[in-house]
Image (cartoon, grey):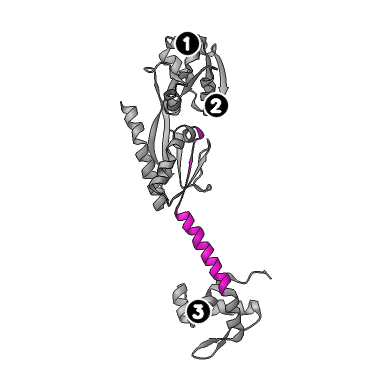
Amino acid sequence: MSSYPPLNSLRAFEASIRLNSFSRAAEELNVTPGAVGQQIRKLEDWLGVELFARSVRQVKPTADGLEYAARISPALQQIIDASQHLRGQREHMVRVVMPPSFAAKWFSKRMARFLIDYPSTSLHVGSSVQFTDFDRDPVDIAVRYFDGNDEKLESVLIYRGQAAAFCSPAYRDRMGFERPADLARATLLNDILHDWWEEWLGQFAEMNPVEIAAIKRIEIDQTSMAIEAAIHGQGVVMANPLLAEEDVMEGKLIHLFPEQVQIVPLGYYLVHPKNRELRGQVKLFRDWLLGEAQELSLLQNT
């Protein structure tokens, strides 16, 4: 026998004792009086005692029933309180996942604004290069870097993907870069998550695949590491301008050829499942983030 009493029977018993009626307990639990009676009988069989004395027209709790109710009621109330507390926390929680580079380079400077505007919300931010599985992962909404096509998701574009060349001012001066073809002398810092060197050099430097393959290259599997390597004068990084904007403003990086920016078929999208109604706080976060991202649309359209 399980050490746990039948839990549905406990609900029926607690309601019957509190309301002093199987019928009223049945109304509260949205079942029939017969179903309540069956649950009470099941609990009595498990306990080995009668909890109610039954007559033709009424039922009355026995002494054992009253004592049992007095002992379990505080525990049941604790379960209710703990459950409501946890449920309330979830109602005010927003769980979002986004690419690490997007989180570090753009979102981290802005997330405090959301909490200022909505101080009762608990914001949980995760970062991953893996796509979120909304059916498995405890996530409400996500930022995803992809082409925007997924029939299961509502996808709203935040920032179109772009590819541009960046390096430190000292590296530019040392190498004497004046035009895209000069990058034949560079060390290319290739962020494999944003691998657009071949397309960019082919379009703007008019290099063929053999010439591109001959350029020195370092392969890096983390965007932030590739950008950091460029800051420290290790070469030229091909990066999304969105991720380099802060370092450019601070003078750590320069945009080598501002007129040579390639539009790529990927972008940052705000996504959530089509078949799942967003909770109130998640809707607030979605609308807030899209509002913050309006500045990005203005920049790209200028």
**Marks 1 and 2 in Cβ contact (< 8 Å):** no
> Are the residues flagged by discs 1 and 3 in contact, CB closer than 8 Å?
no
Across the whole image, how many numbered discs are drawn on residues? 3
The relative height of residue 149 versus residue 186 in the rendered view (above or below) is below
Per the image, the residue denoted by label 1 is 173
* Residue closest to the eye, 259 or 247: 247
Q: Mark 1 against mark 2, which lies toward the viewer? A: 1
In this view, 103 is above or below 189: below
Q: Residues within 10 Å of mark 3 (few under 14, many from 20)?
A: few
Query: Residue farthest to the bottom?
Result: 56
The residue carrying mark 3 is 18
> Which residue is nearer to you in this view: 59 or 289?
289
Residue at image x 34%, y 28%? 299
Q: Is residue 44 visible?
A: yes
Q: Residues within 10 Å of mark 1 (few under 14, many from 20)?
A: few
Residues under labels 1 and 2: Cα distance? 22 Å
Q: Amino acid at mark 3?
A: Arg
The C terminus appears in which quarter of the rendering?
top left
Left or right: residue 145 compared with residue 292: right
* Residue designated by label 2: 225
Q: Which residues are magenta?
A: 73-101
In percent of width and height, residue 201 lies at 45, 15
Q: Nearer the viewer, residue 225 or 174?
A: 174
Residue 50: percent from left, percent from top: 61, 84
Q: Amino acid at mark 2?
A: Met
Q: Position of residue 147 (x, y in %)?
A: 43, 33
Q: CA distance from mark 2 to mark 3?
A: 63 Å
